[in-house]
Amino acid sequence: MEDTNYVKQLNEPARRRYREKITAHIGYDPYQLKKNDFSRDLSDLPAVEAMDITSYLVLHTAYYTASQMKAYKSLEAFNYFVCGWVNDLATKEALNKCRLVFARVNHSQRSGETPLKTWIVAKEDGEVVTAHCNCMAGLSESCSHVGAVLFAIEAGVKMRETASCTTEKCKWLMPSHVKKIPAAPVAMIDFSSAKSKKQKTG
């Protein structure tokens, strides 16, 4: 498959690793797809659970330690999710009964810039196989943006598995995407903690 402009600007080791990932697990380059190539149906998400997130971020990539994951509500990745920094969560079939999940995530320091493009590949049972983000840290296959997408998938899976949850209610409970963080008087700023916001998503 032809390299995208993104792949062409990577250094040779990173370019080679990126090609290996998409060839072995996806069969196409996610960065070549358009919005209508994806499904936004919660039923198509891989069944990612907390255990799968821990396995990937702690055991597979060592991005977090086990003790950090125990206090996951204080993690930068978790806060990105509950604060609405994950947008356009969508999925598409990949190779070997896996699913590609693609999302856009706000920059951690420059919220006004174009959101980052983050993707993960997971087996249908939720085991996370690999991931990528076009931020600087994303070349290592784990970063706070990847973590945020994993938490978003977990929340989506919980919503679809809640028998009493209507479609409209599920949509309403997901954290709203924040495109830009505007300046505002202190009296108008929402200082709700990530913990209190998480209660709304289960």
Image (spheres, rainbow, N blue to C red):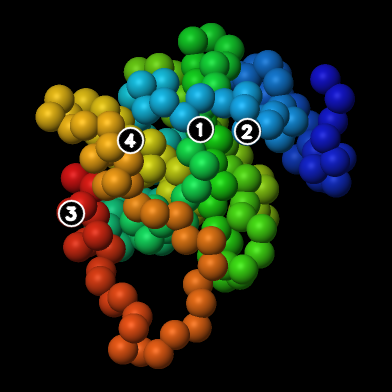
- Toward the viewer: 116 or 20? 116
Crowding near the residue tagged with mark 1, few <14, some 14–19, many ≥20 C-alpha atoms within 10 Å:
many
The residue wearing badge 1 is 90
**Residue at mark 1 to residue at mark 3: CA–CA distance:** 23 Å
**Mark 2: which secondary structure?**
helix
Answer with mark 4 or mark 1, whichever residue precedes in sequence: 1
Tally the marks: 4
Crowding near the residue tagged with mark 3, few <14, some 14–19, many ≥20 C-alpha atoms within 10 Å:
few
* Residues tagged 4 and 1 counted as in contact (Cβ below 8 A): no
Q: Which quadrant would the N terminus be assigned to in this image?
A: top right
Crowding near the residue tagged with mark 4, few <14, some 14–19, many ≥20 C-alpha atoms within 10 Å:
many
Task: Say what amino acid the circle numbered 2 marks.
Answer: Lys
Answer with mark 1 or mark 3, whichever residue precedes in sequence: 1
**Residue at mark 4 to residue at mark 1: CA–CA distance:** 11 Å
Q: Is residue 111 above or below residue 135?
A: below
Task: Say what amino acid the circle numbered 4 marks.
Answer: Gly
Q: Is residue 33 above or below residue 198?
A: above
The residue wearing badge 3 is 199
* Residues tagged 2 and 1 counted as in contact (Cβ below 8 A): yes
Task: Say what amino acid the circle numbered 3 marks.
Answer: Gln
**Residue at mark 2 to residue at mark 1: CA–CA distance:** 8 Å
The residue wearing badge 2 is 35
Residue in the image at 12% along x and 29% along y: 164
Answer with mark 4 or mark 2, whichever residue precedes in sequence: 2
* Residues tagged 4 and 3 counted as in contact (Cβ below 8 A): no
Task: Say what amino acid the circle numbered 1 marks.
Answer: Ala
**Residue at mark 4 to residue at mark 3: CA–CA distance:** 14 Å
Q: Which mark is residue 156?
A: 4
User: Left or right of 53: which side holds 102?
Assistant: right
Residue in the image at 48% along x and 38% along y: 89
**Residue at mark 4 to residue at mark 2: CA–CA distance:** 19 Å
